[in-house]
Image (tube, rainbow, N blue to C red):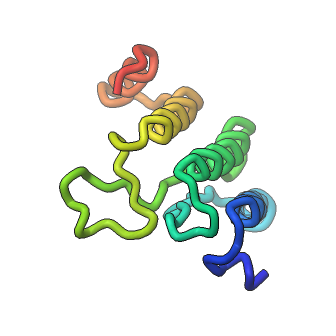
């Protein structure tokens, strides 16, 4: 287990660990706590062994699918927030996990897709909810 926490773990090892970790915490939210679970501050360091930016797409999709699956069946999985989305032009504040969405279109699409899937499950009310669902339907950013 300790090896998975080190940078030497492969992308596949990190992915499998993250999937088990998220699923087990959502299960605890369902069975032990009866509370929603927010999966927050997850990501993949660019220093990970054999890192390729596409590994982030795989990791994010895996976590988003677990959270969405739980939310869709009314379970504890409530949301997932990455670490960290960063603005252009502020590179001095970036860390090894930073992602500038405009520089990674596939990840940007994935984040939006996940947000839209969750929004459609529980659309809410009011102007903000209508605007979010309209953006999802239109495919706009």
Question: How many discs mark residues in the rendered view?
Answer: 0
Q: Quadrant of residue 103?
A: top left
Q: Quadrant of residue 42?
A: bottom right
Q: Nearer the viewer, residue 89 or 70?
A: 89
Q: Residue 77: x, y in percent? A: 65, 51
Report the side of 65 relative to 16 (left or right).
Answer: left
Q: Residue 56: x, y in percent? A: 56, 52
Q: Residue at x 34, y 28 (%)?
A: 141
Query: Which residue lies most toward the left here?
Result: 89
Q: Residue at x 48, y 56 (%)?
A: 82
- Relative to 6, say whether 108 is above or below: above
Query: Which residue lies most toward the front here?
Result: 50
Residue 79 visible in the current orientation: no
Q: Residue at x 32, y 66 (%)?
A: 94
Q: Residue 55: x, y in percent? A: 61, 52
Report the side of 110 relative to 69 (left or right).
Answer: left
Query: Which residue lies most toward the top here?
Result: 138
Q: Residue at x 66, y 79 (%)?
A: 5
Name the image quarter holding the N terminus.
Answer: bottom right
Q: Nearer the viewer, residue 1 or 75?
A: 1
Query: Which residue lies most toward the bottom here?
Result: 2
Q: Nearer the viewer, residue 68 or 47?
A: 47
Q: Residue 88: x, y in percent? A: 23, 50
Residue 58 visible in the current orientation: yes
- Relative to 19, say whether 138 is above or below: above
Report the side of 42 relative to 20 (left or right).
Answer: left
- Relative to 114, say whether 88 is above or below: below
């Amino acid at each position: 287990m300790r090896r998975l926490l080190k940078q030497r773990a492969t992308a596949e090892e990190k992915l499998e660990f993250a999937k088990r970790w998220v699923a087990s915490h959502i299960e605890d939210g369902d069975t032990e706590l009866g509370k929603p679970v927010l999966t927050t501050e997850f990501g993949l360091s660019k220093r990970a062994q054999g890192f390729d930016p596409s590994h982030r797409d795989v990791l994010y999709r895996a976590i988003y699918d677990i959270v969405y699956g739980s939310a869709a069946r009314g379970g504890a999985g409530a949301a997932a927030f990455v670490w960290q989305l960063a603005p252009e032009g502020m590179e001095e504040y970036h860390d090894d996990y930073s992602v500038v969405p405009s520089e990674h279109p596939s990840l940007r699409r994935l984040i939006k897709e996940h947000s839209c899937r969750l929004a459609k499950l529980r659309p809410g009310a009011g102007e903000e909810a209508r605007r979010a669902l309209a953006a999802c339907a239109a495919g706009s950013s």
